[in-house]
Amino acid sequence: MRRKKSGFGITLLLVVFLAIIGGVIYLANSPMFERNRPRIEVPDTLYWNLKKPIAVKLQDDTGIRSYKVTLSDGKNSFVVAQERLETPKKAVDLAVTLPRAGWNRRTTSATMIVETTDISNWNMLKGNSASKKVAITIDAVRPSAYVLANSYKITQGGSALVVFSATDANLKDVAIHTSFGKVFKPEPFYKEGFYAALIAWPVTEKKFRAWVEATDLADNVTKAHIPLYVERYRYRRSNIKLKDRFLNGKIADLASQFDETANVSDPLERFRIINEDIRKKNEDLIHKLSSKISDRLIRRWSIKPFYPLKNGKKVASFGDHRFYYYNGRRVSESYHLGLDLASVKMADVLASNPGRVVFAGYNGIYGNMPLIDHGLGLFTLYGHCSTLSVAEGDVVNRKEVIAKTGKTGLALGDHLHFGVVIQGVEVRPVEWMDAHWIKDNITTVFNTARKMIDRRTH
């Protein structure tokens, strides 16, 4: 009997021992004893203007129990944020600001220490802790920005040139903002600290206002108004009656080329999709390609008037707002964002200025279309061509033949759709075909700016 009791006791002890070991292993691997440190999300180094709070994010898988943020100005340290949370959170967002008193306003550098602990029972019930030291450069001075020279005016649907200065020891971004939300990127011009940009007023926008905006690494911002005289322009409105011959001919042929109209049998719906949806897709490609500009310094930039088609006669104007009707019912609308020119069939299309071909291929309603980059955000496109003489990546010279006119895409007769685009915005081609306009709005502005820059840098 003693042996049986003794054996039973050993078995019981072994079971208890294994249960304890199992319990310890379970607890050690349970969320209560998780061993991952909290995460502190803030850059290792940053610039601070003392106005905008520093954003710090604390995260933990189980929950943040406490945190503490200390700022030091080199002489004194200040606890600017501290809390022990009654209800732990898995994420805590902090907005760190200056202490209310005692901070050395003359210091140009500071240190921030962030400490936090989670609710885990690991580390003898003390939880997991994390800390991070952040080096701060203090910059409360706004960048310098001012306009040197610009075109006298800008017309609705037209263009203008702006040359300006923007400097700061910690400069981050320079751009031209507009009242309709478009941001134009300038290019470095002539000497360090100076910039130039062509800007545009879309034909669809009723109002226009533009300003230079310079931002430094500490998010200090300076804005400089561009003093342009703005001129509204009343573009033509066209009411066009759709004919069955057009719908069942040209439109039916085009519809067979696009996935969007592959299973659409209604002629009017096919037209609407081509005139609106396919047009937008084609224009989006143009806008994307013409929004890419260089960061390299431009010392000089000049342009000659564009005459892409010898003896070309205007057959349709830029900016026409077209409304399409069938049996008295409006079925679609669109804007004509180029100048249509015609001479003879398959006439030579010329590059009036040097440039680089960024696209040469079929682009939906535009048909066979070269798109050429002339620098400073100025692009020209040539639509409905029958054949192309250039390929993407080619560098073209002035008076070089780049294509022949045709009627590819959404075109009924042989002609050239000539478009001018500035950083993704279609503008009036007639301005860039006018030698006097180019002299007054481009050449003179550049010459004036260079003289001013030379005086300021000598």
Image (tube, grey):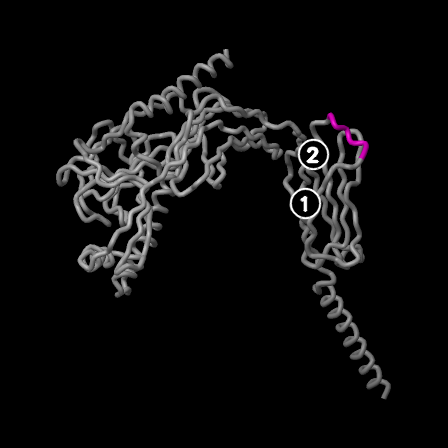
Find residue 7 and report its image quarter: bottom right
The residue wearing badge 2 is 50
**Viewer-proximal residue, 55 or 146?**
146
Amino acid beneath label 1? Val
Q: Could you give the CA–CA distance between mark 2 and mark 1, rounded to whole angstroms? A: 15 Å
Find residue 103 and report its image quarter: top right
Q: Residue at x 36, y 23 (%)?
A: 301
> How many numbered marks appear?
2
Residue 105 lies in the magenta stretch: yes
Q: Quadrant of the N terminus?
A: bottom right
Looking at the rendering, the stretch of residues picked out in magenta corresponds to: 101-106
Q: Position of residue 55 (x, y in %)?
A: 66, 43
Q: Say which element carries label 1.
A: strand
Whether residue 221 is visible here, answered yes or no, is yes
Q: Position of residue 120 (x, y in %)?
A: 75, 58
Q: Position of residue 282 (x, y in %)?
A: 32, 48
Q: Position of residue 22 (x, y in %)?
A: 73, 70
Classed neighbour count for the residue bearing mark 1: other residues with Cα under 10 Å, few (<14), some (14–19), many (≥20) = some
- The kind of secondary structure the magenta stretch mainly shows is loop
Horizontal side, residue 421 vs residue 108: left or right: left
**Viewer-proximal residue, 13 or 255?**
255
The residue wearing badge 1 is 56
Q: Is residue 436 above or below residue 264?
A: above
Q: Say which element carries label 2.
A: loop
